Amino acid sequence: MLITYKNVSIRHKDDDYVLKGVDFEVAAGELIYLIGKVGSGKSSLLRSMYGEAEIDECDEATVLGCDIFSIKRKDLQPLRRELGIIFQDFKLLTDRSVRKNLEFVLKATGWDDKTDRDHRISEVLRDVKMEGCEDRMPNELSGGEQQRIAIARALLNSPKVLLADEPTGNLDPETTDQIMSVFSEIAQTGTAVIIATHNMAILDRFPGTVYQCDEQNFTKYED
């Protein structure tokens, strides 16, 4: 399994628990949804997988073979390089082109050869159907196009797991379907995709395993 959580509980510092007793496993190629209202713990659960939200207690919490409960902060960066992380607000660098946004990540993660970088940038843009936009600036792109670039950025280092926090929250229904088609295709290549969402409409059109966060509880969702 790529991720195994057994009896995991998460809370914010001295506050009450956000989630208690989380049990789930993630295998390669799975498409998984985390649903629940705002503040129910979806985002905190995602953040716990890359060390941004602390696990308060657990029987087991492993992400790509790392014990995320006891991992030291200095060891988080190698783990995060094996994860693709997508935020609702894209977090693109607005002062540089699409190419420079993607190149920034590659340079930071050890891609020293320019030819290799250019080839990889072309590959991920093709994967998200954004070929030919390398020299455009983020403000020249629609919301859906910016999200595609954010996905391309997350794919640069061929992650085993893709984590997406409300990736369609600000998109219209047609663009949402286009983005979800990209996620579905990514899962079919063997990358596990975990999406936190409140958009229930996508669950039927793009089936996956669904878990619900509700009042500290984490359960498998049965419609």
Image: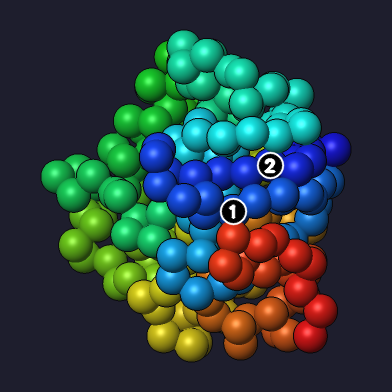
Locate residue 41 relative to residue 103 in the image: left or right.
Answer: right
Q: Position of residue 125 (x, y in %)?
A: 49, 52
State whether residue 67 is above or below residue 136.
above
Q: Nearer the viewer, residue 97 or 195?
A: 195
| Residue at image mark 1 | 19
Q: Which mark is residue 8?
A: 2
Residue under the image location 63 percent in, 44 percent down: 9
Instruction: Determine whether label 2 and label 1 are within 8 Å by CB.
Output: yes
Mark 1, residues whose alpha carbon is within 10 Å: few (<14), some, or many (≥20)? many
Residue under the image location 73 percent in, 85 percent down: 204
Reading the chain from its start, which is encountered first: label 2 or label 1?
Answer: 2
Q: Is residue 167 visible?
A: no
Residue under the image location 21 percent in, 55 percent down: 137
Q: Position of residue 77 (x, y in %)?
A: 49, 21
Q: Position of residue 121 (x, y in %)?
A: 47, 40
Q: Nearer the viewer, residue 200 or 48?
A: 48
Q: Secondary structure at mark 2?
A: strand
Q: Secondary structure at mark 1?
A: strand
